[in-house]
Structures are given as C-alpha cells and as structure tokens.
Amino acid sequence: MNGSGVRLVLLGKPGAGKGTQAALLSAHYGVEHLSTGDVFRAAVAQGTPTGLEVQQYLDTGELVPDDIVIRVVDEHFAAGGPLEDGFILDGFPRTLVQAEELEQVLADHPLDVVLNIDVPTETILHRIAGRRVCVNCGASYHLTQRPTINWTCDVCGGEVVQRDDDSPDAIGRRLALYEEQTRPLLDYYGQQGLLLSVDGSAPTDAVFDEIVGLIDRRRGA
Ligand SMILES: [Zn+2]
C-alpha cells in the first residue's frame, strides 16, 4: 500500500493511455507526474536558455532533439525534489540515448519500475482517429463519447476539435517513430529486470487497478 517515493517510467505507443494513467497514479501515490510536454512548457515559461531553444522546436512542430530533451529533464530534476520524493515519467525517455542519460541523471535514485502499457495498433488507430480535444482546457473526448452540447467542452465551454497530431498521417508517423526509436526500450529495460507490462486495451479503471497491483507487489508493499 505504501507507494510513496515510487520512481516510475510509463512506456507505450502514442494513444496507449500513458497520460491518463500517469495522472491517476500521480494522485494515488502522491508523486509528481512529469510529462515531457509539461516540462517543456515550464522551461519555456521560465524563459531559461534551454527553454528558449525548446520554444523554437515547439514553434515549428519539430521533435525536440535528444540533447535538449535531456538538458530540460536534467534541469528539472536538479531544481526540485522529485529524485527523493518520487515521480512518474510520461513521454520520457523516448529513445535509447535518453534512457541511458536518464540513468546518469538518476544516479543513486534508480527507477523502481518501468511499466509498458500494451495496446494493439488497431485499437490505437481507433482511439486516436476518434479523439477530440478541448482547445481551451485540454479535456479529452471521442467520437463515441461526445460532449453534451455539440462540440462544446462540458468542463469549460471551449471548442472541441481534432488535434493536427491526431490526423491519420500524423498517427502513422508517430507509430513508425515509436517502432523505430521507442520499442527498443522494452528490451533495454527488460534486460535490467525493470519491465512490467499491462494490457492497456481494458477500461481505464481496470488498467489502473492492475498497474497499482503490479507496482505494489514489485515494491513488496
Ligand atoms: Zn474545455
């Protein structure tokens, strides 16, 4: 039951539900949820030199290169207490280079668990192609789970749209990138004995319960 201080990485294809589970796990264990997007936005908002570099990539929609991603995460860990207090990483590491660098950054605070949320590609395609997001607050909807009134956000009244990232072409590119750059991390963490896997095609609550069970057993809680 005591999961405080858990140091966790979530892996999975785009659309596997990493962000959703990370938010639930963050609340459950009381540790920080670090998504690469949030860390990028914080660096940009603080106007650090690294943040200014990140801004250029975000502006053009390009992937932020490994060395800059690593620096942003490094600076984030250096500034706060997540090393001691625990954290859930979502969207990082995304490449082997980033994973190796993370090991250096963590040093004597190694990861407890790397959790792979496994979802068949067909399910991913259905999920993402139907996904609609509020431009204002980021609330997530689906063609099969619409807002009450047209495409107006139930939470804030904002407009609910399909993100450019979720277009069929963009999904294809993101899945290919995952296969090429991120899937090798499964072997990498498997060989270190850190990898656990859950079936992410189950409903959100069931996936969450399974993850918590796995983490707590792993930590001997
Ligand atoms: Zn909204």
Image (cartoon, helix red, strand yellow):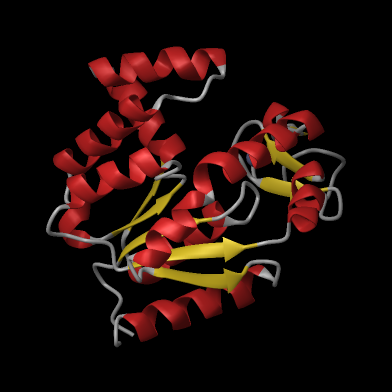
Regarding residue 147, the answer to whether it shows in the image is no
Residue at image coords 82%, 51%: 126
Q: In front here: 173 or 83?
A: 173
| Occupied quadrant, residue 4 | bottom left
Quadrant where the C terminus lies?
Answer: bottom left
Q: Front-most of 84 and 191? A: 191
Left or right position of 55 against 210: left
Q: Which residue is painted at 70% across and 39% down in the image? A: 133
Left or right of 172: which side holds 184?
A: left
The reply to whether residue 33 is in sight is yes
Question: Is residue 113 depicted above or below 148 in this figure?
Answer: below
Write the residue at 22% across / 53% down.
82
| Residue that appears at 68% across and 31% down | 165
Instruction: Tell whether 102 sits left or right of 105.
Output: right
**Figure quadrant of residue 67:** top left
Expressed as whole percent of the image width and height from the top left, the position of residue 160 reads 75, 36
Total numbered labels:
0
Relative to the observer, which residue lies in front, 74 or 101?
Answer: 101
Query: Percent x, y for residue 45?
Result: 34, 23
Q: Position of residue 179 (x, y in %)?
A: 61, 45
Q: Quadrant of the N terminus?
A: bottom left
Q: Position of residue 170 (x, y in %)?
A: 72, 30
- The quadrant where residue 20 appears: bottom right
Q: Is residue 78 above or below residue 210?
A: above
Please name whichever residue, 211 or 161, is drawn nearer the observer in this view of the structure.
211
Check the image and report above or below for 154 versus 10.
Answer: above
Lateral position of residue 82 relative to residue 161, left or right: left
**Quadrant of ligand 1 in image:** top right
